[in-house]
Amino acid sequence: MADCIFCKIAAHEAPATIVHEDEDVVAFEDLGHRAPLHVLVIPRRHVASLAEADAATAGTVAAAAARVAREAGYAERGYRVVTNVGPDAGQSVPHLHFHVLAGRPLGWPPG
Ligand code: AMP
């Protein structure tokens, strides 16, 4: 999608610190860093949110999120994977992304 910042990151047309990429997904550090590990995992193909993702896309992004956490060393200690959908959840970028957060105790419920 032409004016989507995450599409541009996936196409290497906008800067990002990429920690993993393959033909289906790209994972990169969140600029806002809310935890010692804060990575966003996105599908390369533009999908606005989880509400519009098919099962294969959702599953591929979820599996990649777990892989990012595991490879960063948080498999035992734990981590959180969350995706915001729509305005009440505070979704600010309309391209599906799973946040992977780890490295500190994560409060529950989230805000
Ligand atoms: P959300 O509010 O759930 O839609 O999350 C969007 C996230 O994208 C926020 O945590 C932002 O910090 C992050 N973000 C926005 N633009 C960029 C960017 N260019 N590079 C990395 N992270 C970004």
Image (cartoon, rainbow, N blue to C red):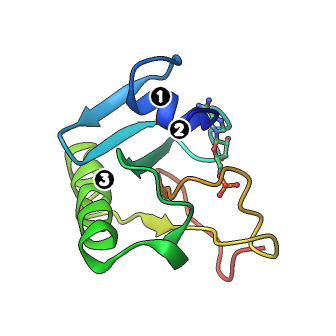
Instruction: Identify which amino acid the numbered label 1 is placed on.
Output: Ile
Disc 1, SS: helix
Marks 2 and 3 sit apart, C-alpha to C-alpha, by: 20 Å
First in sequence, mark 3 or 1: give its number: 1
First in sequence, mark 2 or 3: give its number: 2
Residue 75: percent from left, percent from top: 24, 61
Instruction: Identify which amino acid the numbered label 2 is placed on.
Output: Phe
Asked whether 42 or 78 is in front, the reply is 42
Disc 3, SS: helix
Could you tell me which residue is drawn at 30 percent across and 53 percent down? 69
Asked whether 20 or 23 is in front, the reply is 23
Q: Nearer the viewer, mark 3 or mark 1?
A: 1
Q: Are marks 3 and 1 in contact (CB under 8 Å)?
A: no
Q: Mark 1 points at which residue?
A: 9
Report whether the residue tagged 3 is closer than 8 Å to ligand 1: no
Could you tell me which residue is drawn at 50 percent across and 74 percent down? 52
Q: Mark 3 points at which residue?
A: 69
Mark 2 Cα-neighbour bin, 10 Å: few <14, some 14–19, many ≥20: many
Residue 92: percent from left, percent from top: 74, 53
Instruction: Identify which amino acid the numbered label 3 is placed on.
Output: Ala
Asked whether 100 or 10 is in front, the reply is 10
Q: Are marks 2 and 1 in contact (CB under 8 Å)?
A: yes
Marks 3 and 1 sit apart, C-alpha to C-alpha, by: 20 Å
Q: Is residue 5 left or right of residue 56?
A: right
Report whether the residue tagged 1 is closer than 8 Å to ligand 1: yes
Q: Which mark is residue 6?
A: 2
Q: Nearer the viewer, mark 2 or mark 3?
A: 2
